[in-house]
Amino acid sequence: MKKIFIWILLIFWILLLLHADSVQAEDLEPTDVCVTASVLNGRAKPSKKSRVEAIFDNGDQLTAIGWSANHHWVEVRGGEPGTVWVWWEYVTERTDEFTVINDGKSKIKLRKEPYGTVTGYLKPNKELVIDRVIFGWGHSNKGWIELYYVTEED
């Protein structure tokens, strides 16, 4: 009986830890973002199956306050509960395109998504046109790059 209780307790803690990791947010400085989708659902939790708490239209200005643990959801202020989660690909800090350059001596990683798999590199003295920004990451037709490591061209 004691062994069964220990196993149940262990399974409970594992499930609790898995759940906590899936909804834990990385808090960041509040950042103004613009909705780029024609319609964007704001959900109660960072999950496509979660209840829709708010609906935003293209061009709506929101304040982003954090990432989900997997960096696929952005927590924004709004909706009934005060904050909701939106899919990261449909918001941006900037709506203008701009050019950045790698003015360092090392190549810089390009990724499939922020914090994602490396898909290539931006070599020294090469430029990249950025069309979308979220929490310090810039998107280009070559992939995502951390803007900290590049310089914006004038």
Image (cartoon, rainbow, N blue to C red):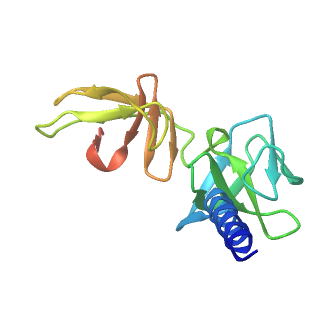
Viewer-proximal residue among 41 and 70: 70
Q: Quadrant of the N terminus?
A: bottom right
Q: Is residue 99 left or right of residue 149?
A: right
What residue is drawn where x is 71% and y is 77%?
A: 2
Task: Between residue 13 and residue 101, name the one nearer to us.
Answer: 13
Q: Quadrant of residue 95?
A: top right
Is 24 situated left or right of 114 in this image?
A: right
Q: Position of residue 83 (x, y in %)?
A: 76, 66
In the displayed structure, 30 sits above or below 42; it is: below
Question: Which percent across, then down, holds residue 82?
Answer: 80, 70
Q: How many numbered markers are drawn? A: 0
**Residue 7, percent across and down?**
68, 66
Vertical placement of 2 versus 43: above or below?
below
Q: Position of residue 115 (x, y in %)?
A: 44, 44
Whether 147 is drawn above or below 113: the answer is: below
Quadrant hosting residue 23: bottom right
Q: Residue at x 70, y 57 (%)?
A: 62
Q: Residue at x 20, y 33 (%)?
A: 107
**Quadrant position of the C terminus in the picture:** top left
Q: Residue furthest front?
A: 1
Q: Residue furthest bottom?
A: 2
Q: Is 53 situated above or below 95?
A: below
- Left/right of residue 8 with respect to residue 92 in the rendered view: right
Find the residue positioned furthest to the left. Answer: 105
